[in-house]
């Protein structure tokens, strides 16, 4: 079952709910085979031809497999402090591992995972604020009044 992370801007009132983790519709990602249905579903979640080429290459190797532990995760831009949700996974083969590296859709800087399940990270999140997509001020904080579970 997935969870959510909700944010709101203290300045302009912008609000957004991010649905994180994975739900029951993601069952094809846990199959033991690397079939076309799994690859089509993953390509829709990732939406990057470059990442999918790397995934296909590693899966074609001996013992190639997809490891989905976290599913949708929060990411933060290392430059402009924008938040984004992306699909996190790991592809493994005998001597290779690959995790997708995502870029910010605003400034193209690298994104890094923001582990919002960690209490210390959540506390830090609220103290430093993030860039609001509406007013562009660093006044985006967690909206702790919402708890959403999804499947």
Image (tube, helix red, strand yellow):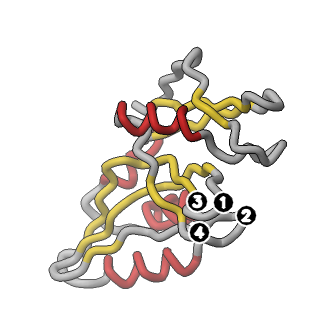
How busy is the neighbourhood of tag 2: few (under 14 within 10 Å), some, or many (20 plus)?
few
Label 4, label 1: how far apart the Cα atoms are: 11 Å
Label 2, label 3: how far apart the Cα atoms are: 9 Å
Which mark is drawn over residue 80? 1
* Mark sitting earlier along the chain (2/3): 3
* Mark sitting earlier along the chain (1/2): 1
* Mark sitting earlier along the chain (4/1): 1
Q: Which residue is mark 3?
A: 77
Q: Position of residue 41 (x, y in %)?
A: 51, 58
Callouts 2 and 3 close, C-beta under 8 Å: yes
Label 1, label 2: how far apart the Cα atoms are: 8 Å
Callouts 4 and 3 close, C-beta under 8 Å: no
Callouts 1 and 2 close, C-beta under 8 Å: yes
Q: Within the image, what quadrant is residue 113 found in?
A: bottom left
At 31% from the left edge and 49% from the top edge, which residue is drawn? 69
* Element class at badge 1: loop
Of the 4 image quadrants, the one containing the N terminus is top left
Q: Which residue is mark 2?
A: 106
């Amino acid at each position: 079952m997935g969870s959510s992370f909700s944010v709101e801007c203290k300045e302009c009132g912008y609000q957004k709910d991010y649905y994180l983790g994975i739900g029951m519709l993601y069952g094809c990602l846990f199959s033991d085979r690397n079939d076309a249905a799994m690859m089509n579903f993953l390509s829709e979640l990732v939406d990057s031809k470059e990442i999918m080429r790397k995934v296909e290459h590693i899966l074609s190797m001996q013992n190639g497999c997809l490891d989905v532990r976290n599913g949708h995760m929060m990411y933060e831009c290392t430059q402009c402090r924008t938040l984004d949700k992306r699909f996190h996974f790991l592809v493994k083969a005998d001597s290779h591992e690959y995790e997708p590296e995502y870029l910010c859709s605003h400034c193209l800087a690298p994104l890094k995972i923001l582990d919002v399940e960690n209490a210390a990270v959540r506390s830090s999140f609220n103290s430093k604020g993030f860039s609001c997509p509406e007013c562009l001020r660093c006044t985006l904080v967690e909206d702790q009044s919402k708890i959403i579970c999804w499947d």
